[in-house]
């Protein structure tokens, strides 16, 4: 099982954690969402529970509930800026069979 970050994503997460003043990494959740079935939910990881798996990439921890690993194995998280007003995480999930038209959700 693996989840990794690009250098851009790791840099962005590190900067956000520094601005926040606390946190151990990125928490990645998967929720039922959108027209395709599943969506990514990102937030700060402040602790690691017994139900979590932790991946370290580019010096940054990514924390994921163990029950969701089959949905994200091989996932690469990037942070992209298309212009001054449009930036965000981009998820490249080799398990996704279909993406919705807006790119916000996926199914397997």
Image (cartoon, grey):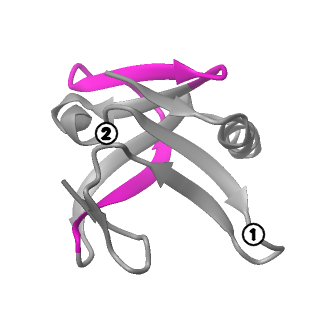
Q: Which residues are magenta?
A: 36-60
User: Please, is residue 80 above or below residue 36 in the view?
Assistant: above
Residue 90 at x, y percent in the picture? 55, 56
Q: Residues within 10 Å of mark 2 (few under 14, many from 20)?
A: many
User: Please, is residue 27 above or below residue 60 in the view?
Assistant: below
Specify the label residue 72 is tagged with: 2
Residue appearing at x 42%, y 28% in the figure: 47
Secondary structure beneath dot 1 equals loop
Q: Is residue 7 left or right of residue 53?
A: right
Q: Is residue 9 left or right of residue 28?
A: right
Q: Is residue 92 left or right of residue 58?
A: left
Magenta stretch secondary structure, dominant: strand
Q: Residues within 10 Å of mark 1 (few under 14, many from 20)?
A: few
Q: Is residue 10 magenta?
A: no
Q: Nearer the viewer, residue 8 or 46?
A: 8
Residue 108 at x, y percent in the picture? 18, 53
User: Please, is residue 52 above or below residue 64 in the view?
Assistant: above
Q: Which image quarter holds the N terminus? A: top left
Residue appearing at x 24%, y 33% in the figure: 69
Q: Is residue 51 magenta?
A: yes
Q: Which image quadrant for residue 23?
A: top right
Specify the label residue 46 is tagged with: none
Residue at the disc numbered 1: 82
Query: Whole-Å distance between the Cαs marked 1 and 2?
Result: 25 Å
Secondary structure beneath dot 2 equals helix
Which residue occupies the extreme right position in the image? 84
Q: Nearer the viewer, residue 70 or 31?
A: 70
């Amino acid at each position: 099982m693996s989840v990794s970050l690009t250098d851009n994503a790791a840099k962005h997460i590190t900067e956000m954690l520094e601005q926040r003043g606390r946190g151990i990494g990125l928490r990645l959740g998967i929720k039922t969402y959108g027209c395709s079935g599943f969506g990514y939910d990102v937030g700060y990881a402040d602790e690691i529970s017994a139900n979590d798996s932790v991946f370290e990439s580019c010096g940054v921890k990514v924390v994921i509930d163990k029950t969701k690993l089959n949905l994200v194995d091989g996932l690469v998280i990037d942070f992209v800026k298309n212009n001054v007003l449009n930036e965000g995480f981009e998820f490249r999930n080799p398990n996704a069979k279909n993406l919705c038209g807006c790119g916000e959700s996926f199914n397997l």
